Image (spheres, helix red, strand yellow):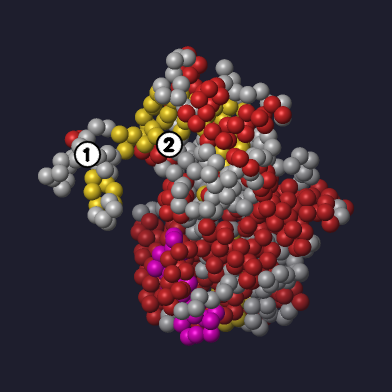
């Protein structure tokens, strides 16, 4: 017997518009039906819809769409029997044999049990006397209704009129019947609206399988469950994750190959290439596309919007569109895009796009209550430092004088707790922790500190002597000094580096042997299997504090600046920071282009406008660009 999965997805919902494609955990709702159908023994996965947009989304996730529904199956009053009649006529026209068994998978009911559906299909194949199978969940029989006079009264006559409360066990068990149905196509041909017949076999499942999107509250509940990270076992068992749409075939591989293909392409070819790269990326960033976008931001905008036309919940496209709009100075559109992204981003960790609300201070909430509401809605994962920092930065952006006293107290408490934690671990004999503590104590004890970034402005400047005049010189990621002494200086007392740069350390030591003996500390958790001695790293509590005060995915230099603002009690000078201004190369000592994965606009604003208020002792020599 031939079994098909059917996903009914009409586009005209009045109560909750577009409920069948609302985004949850980065995927439209109907994608969860497709993912579930892949786990059960069906020959085809069909999407029945009246919308070309829904059809395109369904096809991208792997469903077949044999034409669009006719008017009789598309209106507000259309019922399941109307959809079956439409399919009965449409499938043969498209060369698709009619099935013996339908598995009805509503997009609005994403919690299902594959073993139960598999058993239901087998039961219909083995027992011809059974008309259909319904997957149900137990309900509560103690329902009430509001009568014509406006009073609440029990629905069932079995309620004892002499009692106000009754136990559930005093009533017969009842079940919610609309979770999922498996039935015979022949049943519709014979009985029409009674297509499921009267001999309906029940399979009782957990109550979570009865959750359905019928209004905004129902959707928010289901979305919260789908976006929970880590995924609870109950959710993982009942909701398989959709597979992202496959990338177009024939994408060029490697950075050089992509650069050549992009340079040779016409305007449409560039948009197509970028759209393909966006599809191919499964994470929240798409560095290959962003690398190319600096050559043609207009093509990137068009590519993102092309992808979003079919996949409104495509996180990569939303993220890249927001970054592109921000770098072009269209902050209002960037903010709107980021708020769309916030609605679908899986909750968890400091990489949540709550960070992005600060990106170039995207708009201002009108009053204090609105700012608190803004934070409550989007700042789900930050602590008190994060909340107070956000509100203080809002104040600066709006031209008000921030009250920093509460923020200072919160920072001090967290800082001292982090350093105490570090000291305790060092006292226990952990060598890398001892080295990290020594590093921080040396930094705090210095009479004055120069924090030296690697911006191109150092190459042509004369800051070398001013840098050398400081008692301690801190640099980032083992920069090249030979040949650049006039602008960058010669001395290095401490190095702060990102784990990604560790692979270049041998090359740096080859050019500057002094680095072999220079104390260094990583800004990331260091893997225990790295070659050579385990380098010290910033304690996790300090890293969290840096992220909450600013944002999580920061450049090494910016982390160093924020770290200095947290732990230094003495003057410090900032040299060589321009935060990769548009059009410039990344570092003074090479020709590499500026990276796009960090929020440079925000970093620049933070150092130029907010940090001087928080830490007046930090001096920007010639501004952030010098």
Task: Measuring from the top left, give residue 451's x and y in whole percent.
Answer: 59, 73
Q: Is residue 394 found inside the magenta-colored segment of the image? A: yes
Crowd around label 2: few <14 · some 14–19 · many ≥20 (10 Å): some
What residue is drawn where x is 66% and y is 83%? 622
* C-beta proximity under 8 Å, tags 1 and 2: no
Task: Measuring from the top left, give residue 142's x and y in whole percent.
Answer: 25, 42
Label 1 secondary element = loop
Task: Measuring from the top left, give residue 512's x and y in whole percent.
Answer: 69, 62
From this viewpoint, is residue 165 visible?
yes
From this viewpoint, is residue 229 visible?
no
Q: What is the CA distance from the residue labelled 1 to the residue labelled 2?
A: 24 Å
565 sits left or right of 302 in the view: left
Quadrant showing the C terminus: bottom right
Q: Please say if 610 is above or below 117.
A: below
Residue 330 sits in quarter: bottom right
Q: Which residues are magenta?
A: 379-402
Q: Is residue 101 found inside the magenta-colored segment of the image? A: no
Q: Give the mark, 1 or 2, whose residue is nearer the N terminus.
A: 1
Q: Which residue corresponds to mark 1? A: 157
Q: Which residue corresponds to mark 2? A: 178
Q: Please say if 163 is above or below 501.
A: above
The residue nearer to you, when weighing 45 against 465, is 45
What residue is drawn where x is 18% and y is 35%? 170
The residue nearer to you, when weighing 130 against 139, is 130
């Amino acid at each position: 017997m031939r079994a098909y999965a059917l996903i009914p997805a009409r586009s005209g919902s009045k109560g909750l518009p577009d409920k069948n494609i609302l985004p949850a955990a980065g995927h439209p709702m109907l994608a969860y039906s497709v993912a579930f159908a892949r786990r059960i023994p069906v020959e085809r996965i069909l999407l029945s819809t009246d919308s070309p947009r829904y059809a395109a989304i369904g096809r991208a996730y792997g469903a077949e769409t044999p034409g669009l529904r006719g008017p009789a199956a598309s209106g507000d009053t259309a019922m399941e029997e109307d959809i079956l009649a439409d399919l009965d006529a449409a499938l043969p026209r498209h060369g698709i044999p009619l099935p013996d068994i339908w598995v009805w998978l509503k997009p609005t009911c994403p919690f299902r049990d594959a073993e139960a559906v598999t058993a239901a299909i087998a039961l219909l194949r083995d027992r011809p006397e059974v008309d259909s199978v319904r997957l149900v969940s137990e309900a509560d029989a103690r329902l009430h209704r509001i009568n014509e006079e406006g009073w609440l009264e029990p629905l069932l006559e079995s309620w004892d009129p002499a009692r106000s409360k009754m136990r559930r066990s005093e009533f017969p068990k009842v079940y919610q019947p609309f979770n999922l149905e498996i039935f015979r196509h022949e049943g519709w041909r014979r009985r029409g609206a009674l297509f499921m017949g009267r001999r309906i076999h029940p399979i009782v499942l957990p109550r979570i399988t009865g959750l359905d999107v019928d209004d905004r509250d129902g959707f928010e509940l289901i979305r919260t469950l789908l976006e929970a990270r880590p995924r609870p076992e109950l959710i993982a068992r009942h909701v398989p994750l959709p597979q992202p749409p496959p990338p177009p075939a024939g994408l060029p591989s490697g950075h050089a190959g992509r650069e050549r293909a992009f340079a040779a392409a016409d305007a449409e070819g560039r948009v197509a290439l970028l759209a393909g790269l966006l599809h191919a990326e499964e994470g929240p960033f798409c560095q290959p596309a962003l690398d190319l976008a600096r050559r043609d931001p207009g093509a990137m905008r068009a590519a993102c919007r092309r992808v979003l036309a079919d996949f409104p919940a495509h996180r990569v496209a939303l993220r890249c569109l927001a970054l592109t709009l921000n770098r072009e100075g269209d902050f209002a559109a960037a903010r709107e895009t980021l708020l769309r992204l916030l609605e679908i981003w899986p909750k968890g960790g400091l990489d949540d796009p709550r960070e992005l609300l600060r990106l170039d201070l995207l708009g201002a909430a009108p009053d204090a209550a609105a700012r608190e509401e803004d934070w409550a809605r989007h700042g789900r994962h930050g602590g008190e430092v994060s909340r107070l920092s956000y509100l203080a930065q809002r104040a600066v952006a709006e031209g008000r004088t921030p009250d920093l006293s509460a923020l200072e107290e919160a920072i001090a408490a967290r800082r001292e707790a982090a350093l105490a934690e570090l000291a305790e671990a060092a006292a226990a004999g952990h060598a890398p922790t001892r080295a990290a503590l020594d590093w921080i104590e040396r930094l705090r004890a210095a009479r004055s500190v120069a924090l030296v970034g690697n911006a191109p402005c150092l190459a042509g400047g004369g800051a070398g002597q001013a840098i050398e005049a400081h008692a301690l010189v801190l640099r980032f990621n083992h920069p090249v000094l030979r040949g650049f002494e006039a602008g960058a200086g010669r001395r290095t007392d401490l190095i702060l580096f990102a784990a990604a740069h560790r692979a270049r350390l041998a090359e740096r030591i080859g050019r500057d042997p002094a680095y072999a003996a220079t104390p260094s500390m990583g800004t990331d958790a260091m893997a225990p299997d790295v070659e050579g001695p385990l380098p010290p790293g910033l304690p996790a509590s300090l890293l969290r504090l840096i992220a909450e005060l600013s944002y999580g995915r920061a450049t090494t230099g910016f982390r160093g600046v924020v770290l200095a603002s947290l732990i230094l009690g003495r003057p410090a000078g900032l040299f060589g920071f321009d935060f990769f201004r548009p059009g410039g190369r990344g570092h003074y000592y090479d020709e590499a282009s500026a990276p796009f994965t960090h929020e440079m606009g925000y970093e620049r604003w933070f150092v130029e406008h907010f940090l001087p208020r928080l830490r007046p002792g930090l001096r920007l020599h010639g501004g952030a660009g010098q």
